[in-house]
Each structure stands twice: as C-alpha cells, then as structure tokens.
Image: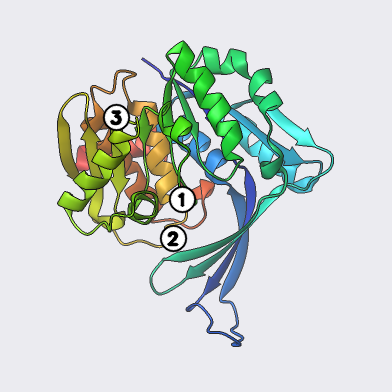
Amino acid sequence: MVNKIVVLGSINLDSILKIERLPQAGETLSMLDKSSAPGGKGANQAVAAARAGGANTAFIGRIGKDDAGDILKNTLQKEKIDVSQLVVDSTHGTGQAYILLQATTGQNSILVYGGANQCLTGDDVKAAQSLIKAADFLICQFETPIDVTIQAFTYAHQLGVKTILNPAPAVKTLPAELLAVTDLICPNETEAQALTGIAITNQDSMQQAAASFARQGCPRTIITVGDRGAYVSDQQQNLEQFVAAFKVKAVDTTAAGDTFIGALTASLQPDFSDLVEATTFANRASSLAVQKLGAQPSIPTLEQVQAALNRG
C-alpha cells in the first residue's frame, strides 16, 4: 500500500555557509564555501516522504511572489508532490534559512526568516480540506503558526486521519488542545526536554518524557537522539523500544530529522502496528542523508534506502 501523506508546513530557500567553527562574539571569520538549496522543515519532510518513502504526497504552505518561491515550487513539482494548496503570498517574501555548517563536525546552527510561512492561515486549512480528508497521515511542524496546526489536526482527527507532530523548532509549552489531537509526536532530545522539563540522558528519562506526552493526550512518542538512534513508545500497544542508528560519518546533519519524519510516515501502517520497523527504515534513510551536503539534495531515494537496508 502506498501511503497518502499531507504535509502542512514551512518551505524555505537555504543558504549553506560552510565554516571551520562558529565565530565568537565580535569575531570575523572567513567562510570555506557557500551554496544554496531548497529547504524548510515542511518541504523537506514532504520531499522525504515522496522520494525516500515513495508516498503519494501533497503540501500545504505559502511562498512569496519572488524568484525563490518559483524555484521552490518547481522543486516540489519535480518530486511529483501536489502543490495545489501552495499559496503565493503577494505581501511577504519566501522563507529563508541561513545554515552555519561546521566543516570539522558536520554539525549546524540555523537562522530562519519565516516570511510567508508565518502568514499561513485557517483559511488555507479550509481550502485544503479535501486533501486532508483523502490522506492517511497529516504532518505538521512549528515553522508555521501553531493555531493553524491545531485547526488542521482537529479536522484530521475528526475524520480519522492520523496526525504526526514534529515539535521543531523547540517551544516551551504545547497547547493542550494540540496534543489531544496528535497521534504521534516526534521530538529530538532537546525538544523533548524543552516540552517536558525532563533532561533526556538515558532510556528511563525518555520513558518519563513519553509518559508525560501520553498524560496530555498523545499516545505515541518517538524521541530521536542523533547518531545514537531513536526511542519508540506506544502506550496503546504497550510498546517501548530503543532502535539503534546506523553508524556513518556525518558530513551535514541539516536534513537528518526531516528525512527521518518523512521516511517514517511513508513506511508506517495507519494503525501504527509497524512502528519499530518504520523507525528502522527512517533511521537508515536519515543515515544516508547526513552523508551529503544540503537539505533536500541529501535526501535519498526509496531504492537507495532499501539497498542500504539489504546491505545491513
């Protein structure tokens, strides 16, 4: 079965600034290299679902009436992603991200200009209701307004469409009404700590964080912990398991989390019965993504992920 996935979220043009290390206060450093690539957490996850997972994917978002917006729309169309609900905002520019990539470690720091992403409205959700209604899964993140996410998740939940929340960038609190209509929350360790107040140091602390989300209405949690792997919890299936990562040398971790979310959702059964297997698939897709530069350019194909899994 090919999953039908709708992603509501951000779409940015990324500028990747390669540096030796982060500058200190008042310091000026020369860059080693500079490049640009399509990005934005929402668009990255949509591309990962379509490319790495082979899912039938649609995107809900906003771009500016500018060259960057045209480039990003064309990129999604080349991935055969439905862009019928990608709105052109005539007032605000297309979102931009500036990625400070440290050459020695592959780690990154990111500055984001939200632009048109922050102008997504409830009317955009209403216009996309037919897309959401036909979907198996709806994915949202936090680079677009949270109240719009709540509206979209509430509508999806009423229809039985499964909702997956990537709470990134991190926020201090989640509205209770959002967790109540979230079927699976996927934070990284930093985001999990910010949302629960629990320091993520071992599997016991991950279990405590998952229990906190469950008490607030979300029965399933996946906490990603970088190159160590991902912790999986499903309160409804009495499931708790740590799924180890595949060991590789990271070049650029920019799209690792987004690749994980998209690939995971594309391979999931709508009843979440294969949550561990889907997490393994997502781990493998993410391990391939971090070995290349850029956000969307680094996302592997379904064939590449399957071949890597077969190699072990």
Q: Which residue is mark 1?
A: 255
Which secondary structure, mark 1? loop
Classify 10 Å Cα crowding around label 3: few (below 14), some (14-19), many (20 and above). Answer: many
Between residues 166 and 279, which one lies in front from this camera angle?
A: 166
> Can you give x and y, in whole percent of width and height, for residue 165 in the image?
43, 36
Instruction: Evaluate if marks 1 and 3 touch, with contact meaning CB atoms under 8 Å apart.
Output: no
Which secondary structure, mark 2? loop
Classify 10 Å Cα crowding around label 1: few (below 14), some (14-19), many (20 and above). Answer: many
Task: Identify the image quadrant of the C terminus.
Answer: top left
Between residues 303 and 79, which one lies in front from this camera angle?
A: 79
Asked whether, in this view, residue 87 is left or right of residue 256, the answer is right
> Can you give x and y, in whole percent of width and height, for residue 161 in the image?
44, 17
Instruction: Say which quarter of the image contains residue 121.
Output: top right
Residue type of the residue flagged with mark 2: Asp
Which residue sits at x=84%, y=39%? 90
| Of marks 2 and 3, the one in the foreground | 3
Between disc 1 and disc 3, whose residue precedes? 3
Q: Which residue is mark 3?
A: 219
Between residues 129 and 281, which one lies in front from this camera angle?
A: 129
In the image, residue 130 sits, relative to residue 34, either above or below, namely above
Residue type of the residue flagged with mark 1: Ala
Give the mark count.
Answer: 3
Q: Which mark is residue 149?
A: none
Asked whether, in this view, residue 176 is left or right of residue 13, the answer is left
Q: Which residue is mark 2?
A: 252
Instruction: Evaluate if marks 2 and 1 touch, with contact meaning CB atoms under 8 Å apart.
Output: yes
Instruction: Say which quarter of the image contains residue 290.
Output: bottom left
Which residue sits at x=68%, y=19%? 127
